[in-house]
Amino acid sequence: MTEITTAQPSRLTTAFDIPRPPGLTWYVQAQQPVGYEVSLTRGLLSPVNPALAKAVGADGRGGVRALVVVDRVVDKLYGTALRDYFAAWQTDATWLVMSGDEETKVLEQAVDVTRAMTEMGILRRTERVVVVGGGVLMDVVGLAASLYRRGAPYVRVPTTLVGQVDAGVGVKTGVNHGTHKNRLGTYFAPEVTLIDPEFLRTVPERHIANGLAEIIKMALIKDADLFRLLEETVAHISSDTMANCGSAMSEVISRAIAGMLDELEPNLWESVLERSVDYGHTFSPSLELRADPPLLHGEAVAVDMAVCVALAEGRGLLGTTEAHRALALIAAAGLPLTHPVFTPELLQVGLADAVKHRDGLQRLPLTDGIGSCVFVNDVTAAQLAAALEFVHAYADHRTDGPGR
Ligand SMILES: NC(=O)c1ccc[n+]([C@@H]2O[C@H](COP(=O)([O-])OP(=O)(O)OC[C@H]3O[C@@H](n4cnc5c(N)ncnc54)[C@H](O)[C@@H]3O)[C@@H](O)[C@H]2O)c1
Ligand SMILES: [Zn+2]
């Protein structure tokens, strides 16, 4: 702590001659190390796999409790296996089954989790909350854990592709509020995230494509090898191939996770606003807000990425062939390139919103060649309109088939 003594005025200067206290300011500076594990494993729910037991502190001899919060859909599919697992490890689990739908991602849901923690009388440091579900439930339970007594340990088991390569990997928690997505939230790391691609077997194909959008993003901004691997394998990517996790899919998932962690680690609290992981997330929030029927997040990100690819091409950052390869990959992943409400006007609105969000500058991430990223601050309305035309021209004359 530093004591800062400020000089006193020689005489009282306020209008009412109120005596001032001595001019002292204390400046407190502390640091809190943050560390958490992200672990890719197989057979997570097999009783011979100790990973989840270890995460809740169980050694099979009893006396360990945990609050297990499970997505309702996941509970139907994996509830029995989960219960058998904890029983095998002599863990006294309290179950809370909740909706994992975006519409229920609200503060009351997080409060419900804290209520269950209170009712269980969860010990503050040694008993864990385990969340098993997609990005929605992980965000809700992460928020609850961060609020409960100002922070309680929790463990994440993501069961969707978005959960496994994105939401489960960083430290953000949150719920929607008013008309705003994730408006209330915290930065709060779990102790561990345990990722088992086997959960992806039951994820609908549309949600696999949804997660692929974030993987393609990582490839475009920082991993040319991942991009090539995706080009080679995208036609065969499905819930089953992802769940089987052969060598190619294992590499796709692990490269996506490693790339994400590499980007997040030096900027965990987003103090730097130039974030390459914001690629595809500049115009997409405005699109997500207006698309009816609603788009999945990754679908809106895909449409945003497509226009960013075209913007980079228009500015000479990306060759035309590379731009076409990027658009082809997005389409082949089963993702949209365009959307009827994604007009030049909407692009301008989206960019203006992003400028506010990014503290006054565009800070727009663009690919400077596949696998590399730069930030620009001077994109014009004309460039946006031209980029949109480029994408539409490509989409209208695409000869590479309807995707997978
Ligand atoms: N915190 C972050 O950094 C971060 C990052 C990305 C996304 N998110 C958030 O994540 C949410 C999106 O996550 P999501 O795409 O996982 O959606 P989701 O959690 O809504 O899951 C999608 C659907 O799949 C179901 N489901 C979950 N696992 C399943 C399984 N194994 N088999 C079959 N069905 C299953 C769910 O019940 C749900 O209906 C958004 O709210 C977004 O804001 C957060
Ligand atoms: Zn995203």
Image (cartoon, rainbow, N blue to C red):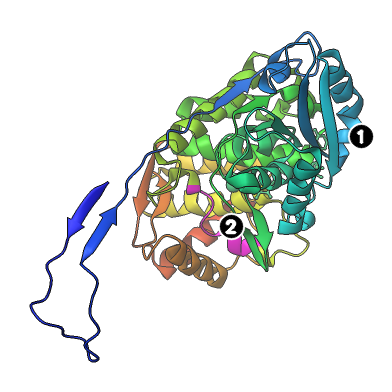
Query: Does the stretch in magenta take in 336?
Result: no
Q: Is residue 43 above or below residue 370?
A: above
Q: Return the x and y of residue 252 as percentages of the image width and height.
A: 60, 25
Q: Nearer the viewer, mark 1 or mark 2?
A: 1
Q: Return the x and y of residue 384 as percentages of the image width and height.
A: 46, 63
| 269 relative to 167 in the view: left or right | left
Report helix, strand or loop for mark 1: helix
Extent of the magenta region: 278-288
Q: Nearer the viewer, residue 112 or 98?
A: 112
- As shown in the figure, which amino acid type bears the numbered disc 1? Lys
Disc 2 target residue: 284
- Residue at 89 percent across and 31 percent down: it is 77
Q: Quadrant of ligand 1?
A: top right
Tell me where residue 158 sits by quadrant.
top right
Q: Nearer the viewer, residue 298 or 102?
A: 102
Disc 1 target residue: 76
For mark 1, does the 10 Å Cα neighbourhood hold few (<14), some (14 to 19), or many (20 or more) residues?
A: few
Report helix, strand or loop for mark 2: helix
Q: Return the x and y of residue 328 as percentages of the image width and height.
A: 60, 40
For mark 2, does the 10 Å Cα neighbourhood hold few (<14), some (14 to 19), or many (20 or more) residues?
A: many
- Residue 400 in view (yes/no): no
Q: Return the x and y of residue 170 as percentages of the image width and height.
A: 55, 38
Q: Sequence order check: which comes first, mark 1 or mark 2?
A: 1
Q: Is residue 212 above or below residue 298?
A: above
- As shown in the figure, which amino acid type bears the numbered disc 2? Ser
Query: Does the stretch in magenta take in 280?
Result: yes
Q: CA distance from mark 1 to mark 2?
A: 32 Å
Q: Is mark 2 within 8 Å of ligand 2?
A: yes
Q: Nearer the viewer, residue 109 or 317?
A: 109
**Count of picture labels:** 2
Quarter of the image with the C terminus is top right
